[in-house]
Each structure stands twice: as C-alpha cells, then as structure tokens.
Image: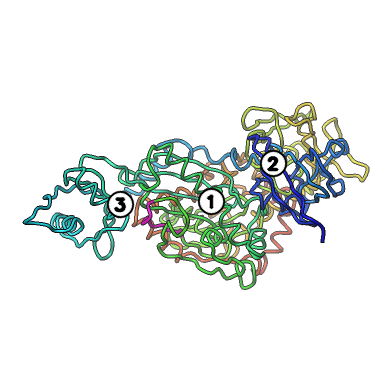
Amino acid sequence: MGENRRILFKLESTGAEQSVDVPPGESLLEAAKRAGVALDAPCGGSGTCGKCRIKVLAGDVKGGQSRHIAPQEFADGWRLACESYAESDIAALVPDTASAWQRSIRVDGSDSIRGNAAFRELLGELEAMGLKPDSGLSLTRLALDPPSIDNPMADRERLLQKLERQTGMRADVALYALCKLPSLLRQADFSVCCVLRRETAGLTVLDIFPGGAAPVIAGLAVDIGTTTVSALLVNLLSGDILASASAGNGQIRYGADVISRIIESGKSGGQERLRRAVTDECLVPLIVRLCEAAAIPGEQIYRAAIAANTTMTHLFLGVDPAYVRLEPYTPAFFESGPLSAAALGLPLHPDAEAAIAPAIGSYVGGDITSGVFASMMFKKPEISLLIDLGTNGELVLGNSEFLMSCACSAGPAFEGGDIGCGMRATDGAIEACAVDRKTMAPQCTVIGGQKPLGLCGSGLIDLIGELFRCGIINARGKFVKEGNRIRRDEWGGAAYIAAFADESADGREICLGESDIDNFIRAKGSIFSAIQTLLASLDFDYSVIENVYVAGGIGSGINMRNAIRIGMLPNLPAEKFKYIGNSSLHGAYSMLVSSEAAAMIEQTGRGMTYIELSTHPGYMDELVAACFLPHTNGALFEYIE
C-alpha cells in the first residue's frame, strides 16, 4: 500500500486553509468532503457536471483532461476534483465560484425582510380562521413571600405553590429553570417572571427572569431544502419576525439530489456525515446568526418547527432513509411526534420542543404539507394546483374536498445541475434573459449586477423560451439558425453563446449547448407530465384549474409566459398564476406560532392522497409526449406566441 498524501486546500473566498491526509485512490473531491471544504458537486462526483473545479498550485496530480476544462486551463493547473488524485503532497486553490452556493445563494426575497408583509398576511389569514398566535407558551409574573425561620419552604415548592394558586393549574419546574432559581430569587427580591409551557397535565416553568424583565419568548421556523436551508426567529407572543437567515445545505457536496444523498448515507459513517453537514455546518451557524441579529441568547428559543422533504427529514433526524428509494418506497416515518431540540443538536433552550411537519409519501414530505397549508388551497372550493420547483418537483392538486399529490424526478436542472453553464441562484447568475429575434443578441439580468458567470434556473427557462420563440431552436431543442452567437463543433453539435469570454466574469464563454437543452427539456417535461397524470387520474383537464400556486427556490424569477411557451406549465391565463415564495417556510412559521395550525397541518397531511408516478400507468407515455418544445400535442399550447 502507498503512503498517505497531505492535501492543503486554500479557499479563495476567505483566504482560509484546510489540510487533510488522503490515502491512495481517494479523489480530491472525497478529500474535500472529509476536510469539510465546500465544493459544489451536483452530479455527486461522476464527472458530468464540471462544477468541482480546483486549481493545483503545487504538487503532482493524476487525472486526465476533462471536457469541462479547456486546454489552456488544464495547462494552468485547473482540474475537476472528482477526477483528480494526489501523487504527492499538493496545494490546491478552491475558487470562490466553487463554494458560493454555501454563503450567497439567493432565496425568496420576502423571507429575508424583517417583519415582512408576506408573514404578516399569513398571520392575518390564521387569525381569520380563528387561529390566533398561541404556541402554548406564555409569561407570568409572580411575587413570592421570602423564606423565614417560620416559613422555610424550599424555593421550588414556594414557586409552584404561588403559581398553582395564581393560575389554578398544576405545575412543574424544568431543570434549566431550577438551576437558576435559588440565586435569581434572591437577586430579584423574590419577584420573578416565568416562561410557561402549557402541557396536557398542566404547566411547566421553562425559564425564570427578574420580575421587572421583559424577556423575548422566541421560536425558530426552519425549511430544510435539498439545496438551501432558510430560518426565521419569531416572537411567539406577537408573531413578529425578529431575524431571518439562509445558507446552502452543507449536504450539497454529497450530490445535488436526494438519491445521491441516500446512496451516500449507506456508506460507512455516511448517515452521521450527512446529519452533521446539515446540523453542525448549517443550522447551528444560522441559529447563532439569528440570535446575534435579535440580540438574544439561544436559550431563549423555546420552540422550533421544521419542514423538509421526506429524505431531508430522515437525514436530519439521523434515521436511515435507504428504503425511501427502494420499491415499495417506504419511509421510516411520516409523523415523528414531538422531539427534543437538544437531542437534535440544536443550540436552543435545553427543554425546547421541535415539531416536524408530516410527510405523506416517499418523495412528498413536510415541505409540501406545509406549502398546502400556506397556500390555503385546502380550504378553498375552487380547484388549485401547487407546484414546488426546486431540486425536486412536487405537485398537489385539489380543493377543500380532496388533495392529490405526486413528485417527479426533474433532476437538478432547475438548480443549474446537468447544465454546462448552469449554476445556482448566487451572485453572477443570469436570472432573466430576452433575445432579439433579428440579431440573436441576448439582454440579460444578472444577480448582483455584475458580469455573468452562468445561468440559474429562471435564466434557463427564459433563454430556452426565447430561443424557441425566435426560431433559433426547434421543437427538439436543436439549433436551426446560424449567426455569430451560434457555435458549432466538429461533431455537429451546436451551442448558443449567452456571453462571450470578454463579457463574462471569469473569462470563459457562457454557452448553452444542445445537450444542455435536452437535459432541461427532460426536466420541464417531467413537471408537465406529472400535472397531466394528476389531472388524468381524476378524468380532468387543466381547464378545471382556477389557481396555480408556484413555490420553491426558482419560482420568484420565473417568467410564467416563457415557462408556458416551453411546455413546463399549463397554458392558462396569467392571472391564474401566483408566486407564493418559500411556502415550506411559511407553513413552518404557521406551525410555530399556532399549535392549532400545527394540528391542522398534520390533519391535512393525513387527508392527502399520494400517487407514486414511477409505477403509475400512463405516466411514461405522458413524459415522452412532454419532452418536446412545447409538447407533441400542439393543441395544448395554441395561441402561444
């Protein structure tokens, strides 16, 4: 056996350095994973996405030249980490673009505005349903008689006696509060303020403060997405948002999709690696940031509500997700029951409870039950369609009488995976694009206002829609026009140049090739065929749909007209479409501020019907028909310019 090699990773984004010893035969991508270095690898390390680029600064590396690395870049030391192996001690630069997803990925803007209108509107809808903010937590002030020789009753019993007399309910004291009790009582002259939690058997004193204090009773709402984790810190007594934050899910380096993560979890130590990637690397720092922004300690977060898809929930809890992907596709659980935040490794009050939004199927999880609640489609008589677009595609069709759901394997194309110039919605991503029919020149909108680095999901939808509208590509996604923006290779393939080398941020052309378009057509076809299958299962067509709620990471930037033009969304009037943001986080917020809303979300989940598309008759025929621009049945998309 050969000897281990020392790899030194230098992070361009921060200037930090991280070293790790690797055995022979371990790729630099695997080494980066073990070292906790954030390298984007949507393909899971198969070499197909070309995103895990690093630059070898010193030492010898074995590995051929990838098609994603130009000859001059290869000569300058650029390599794909997944296809490179150290033959000596080496130093490698991790470029800013390889890890930008972890710190600058963009989420729905309404989630990042303190006290934003979207959550206030949701709070108003809850109150209209009779669900006022009631998390089961409250503040009560008590003035106790100090002990004396004649009355030497213990502090705990003295507190409980007064509390039970004042509230008429039996009570107990949590250990955390009990440890604070003796000194605080005397410092506060026996006048205290108690944080109480209502239990089935009575009250629990979670925390105590001096009588004149006005402590914040805070709660944490979290959406654990496959790509992004978003969180809110909320005042549970008022429903006001105290702070918000988001970050890339640390599990991304193990693959962009849930199947890659499930496979990784089956490896030795994989389950724990994935759990720590989302908890220790992502959630814990987010909570610290939230608490700093709100100027409160983590111990004042007394409740948490978490929404995530089925696989993410399993991995977050440390539960084996292996059988989610194996027929008959059986998760370990749909509902978890109340959990201890401390047991989950979250730096909150040690007795804080965490509620997990219930799943309803192997690929339709708590993020969708939360989204259904946030959309309020479950209580409306008209038929609505909820489409959650992200790394995965989940759909719900129904109204107050029925709800049917399914998930489609759209792949990572909507997040920029499987696309040569694709990237996530971070600074430098083209998020919108218009193409001039005569000159074929693009007019692009770039996140951050800088030179472009690539195309994110909404930009891809726009560009492909525009290329099709201008007749530059045909129904199969093949280029049928020539011009200075069209580049053909020696094998007959073609690509559209969205940005020339001197127009891009890193000096590389941003090109959308026919293979990229083909990957995207399959992804959009997966969404539309899932819609068709849901409708067909009820003998409906899409004329019955009154509302289309679009949620998820890329929905905010989608040009609905272009999404319809390419056959991703049904051909319905524009006024029927409504973008509702991060509906999963909105649902988690509802669960957090209202125990009754949490119970309703559980009940809604139990009443939903889940269709497994992979075994549903007719789905594959629908998918094949949808893998054209816009569709093989042109009548479905008449009158689209």
Question: In the shown orientation, is residue 542 left or right of residue 298?
Answer: right
Please state which amino acid type lies under the numbered disc 3.
Asp
Q: Which residue, given by chain and number where applicable, does mark 3 sit on?
A: 134
Q: Sort mark 3 into few (<14), some (14-19) or many (20+) by Cα contacts within 10 Å.
A: some
- C-alpha separation, residue under disc 1 versus residue under disc 3: 30 Å
Q: Nearer the viewer, mark 1 or mark 3?
A: 1
**Under tag 2, what secondary structure?**
helix
Give the magenta-colored segment's residue range: 349-357
Q: Nearer the viewer, residue 70 or 11?
A: 11
Q: Earlier in the sequence, mark 1 or mark 3?
A: 3
Please state which amino acid type lies under the numbered disc 1.
Asp
Q: Position of residue 85 (x, y in %)?
A: 80, 51
- C-alpha separation, residue under disc 2 versus residue under disc 1: 21 Å
Q: Which residue, given by chain and number where applicable, does mark 1 sit on?
A: 280
**Under tag 1, what secondary structure?**
helix
Report the disc number at residue 297: none
Find out whether residue 284 is within the magenta segment: no
Find out whether residue 353 is within the magenta segment: yes
Q: Which residue, given by chain and number where applicable, does mark 2 sit on?
A: 98
- Which residue is pictured at 51% across the width and 64% down the height? 360
Q: Toward which corner of the image does residue 329 lie, by quadrant?
A: bottom right
**Under tag 3, what secondary structure?**
loop
Q: Nearer the viewer, mark 2 or mark 1?
A: 1
The residue positioned farthest toward the bottom in the image shown: 328
- C-alpha separation, residue under disc 3 versus residue under disc 2: 43 Å
Please state which amino acid type lies under the numbered disc 2.
Ala
Q: Earlier in the sequence, mark 3 or mark 2?
A: 2
Q: Nearer the viewer, residue 16 or 101?
A: 16
Q: Sort mark 1 into few (<14), some (14-19) or many (20+) by Cα contacts within 10 Å.
A: some
Check the image and report above or below for 225 versus 73.
below
Q: Sort mark 2 into few (<14), some (14-19) or many (20+) by Cα contacts within 10 Å.
A: many
Q: Earlier in the sequence, mark 2 or mark 1?
A: 2
